[in-house]
Image: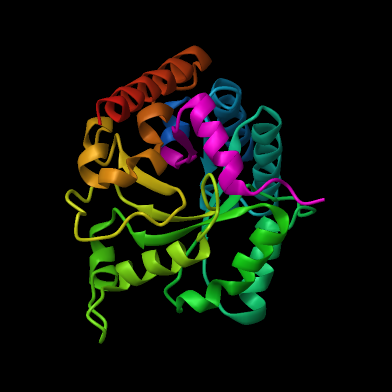
Amino acid sequence: MSLEPFGARLRRAMDERGPLCVGIDPHASLLADWGLNDDVAGLERFSRTVVAATADRVAVLKPQSAFFERFGSRGVAVLEKTVEEARAAGALVVMDAKRGDIGSTMAAYAESFLHKDAPLFSDALTVSPYLGYGSLKPAVDLARENGAGLFVLALTSNPEGAEVQHAVRADGRTVGATVLAHLAAENAGEEPMGSFGAVVGATLGDLSSYDLAVGGPLLAPGIGAQGATPADLPAVFGAAVRNVVPNVSRGVLRHGPDVVALRTAAERFAEEISAALTAA
């Protein structure tokens, strides 16, 4: 049987645990800061520690697949275990893999992360629409079938993204706005929240020229090491702020390997986010 739709599960998790998403990004430099070797054993220790510290209290954990894939099959095996343990502890898992392709290749990527029987099955997957939004259809269809979701790159926090995402189409609409419009159509009529979200950087400042009311979640990287703060969220996201899933990675991870310190850092960000949203 299919799971309850991702949007409904995420809305409940956000209401019960707050909207914080903690990234699991085992950079070589972070492994070193934790006193771990840059190898599979260090990767496993890092990942399991983050899960133990946070998975029972935050809404979302977001492993960055690249930092696992660089160790080959043994790294992917650690990623599988990370996903399994995080979901077992009650966190929703967004796989940050930013996949994007066409036809059968896109379908294969989707099956890797969005099929309920796949070893890496995750609650949602980050995807790139820059081969045309329609190229994502295999992932959209499989996500619907399995109660999963997507986060589609729309207005990203990296400066280079603007040359594509702010480009103006012949119809006068920017590429980023076009992606948002597609997502609004995907989520039409879904309650309490659709399962197809956008990635929108918390560092981008005034986005009032964009319609962020896509009916689904907005994954917001950039808080902490990239310079944005929880207090920035209402100004950036406006009326859509209730659907924002703020992501913090290094701001939490730098406090490891101590489990209590990691947990305290996550709780502090969660409290600051809650205060900012309440004030809005």
x, y percent for residue 252: 40, 27
Front-most of residues 7 and 40: 7
x, y percent for residue 213: 36, 54
x, y percent for residue 181: 38, 67
Is 119 displayed left or right of 7 in the figure? Answer: right
Q: Is residue 149 above or below residue 82?
A: below
Residue appearing at x 25%, y 38% in the figure:
234
Q: Is residue 36 above or below residue 201?
A: above
Residue appearing at x 56%, y 34% in the figure:
12
Q: Is residue 221 above or below residue 168?
A: above
Q: For residue 51, what is the image quadrant?
A: top right
Residue appearing at x 52%, y 64% in the figure:
186
Magenta segment: does it hold 3?
Answer: yes
Is 111 displayed left or right of 57 in the figure? Answer: right
x, y percent for residue 61: 54, 37
Front-most of residues 49 and 57: 57
Magenta segment: does it hold 196?
Answer: no
Residue placed furthest toward the bottom: 170
Decide if residue 182 is in sight here: yes
Is 189 displayed left or right of 273 in the figure? Answer: right
Front-most of residues 39 and 145: 145
Front-most of residues 243 and 24: 243
Q: Which residues are magenta?
A: 1-29
Is 262 displayed left or right of 123 in the figure? Answer: left
Quadrant where the C terminus sits is top left
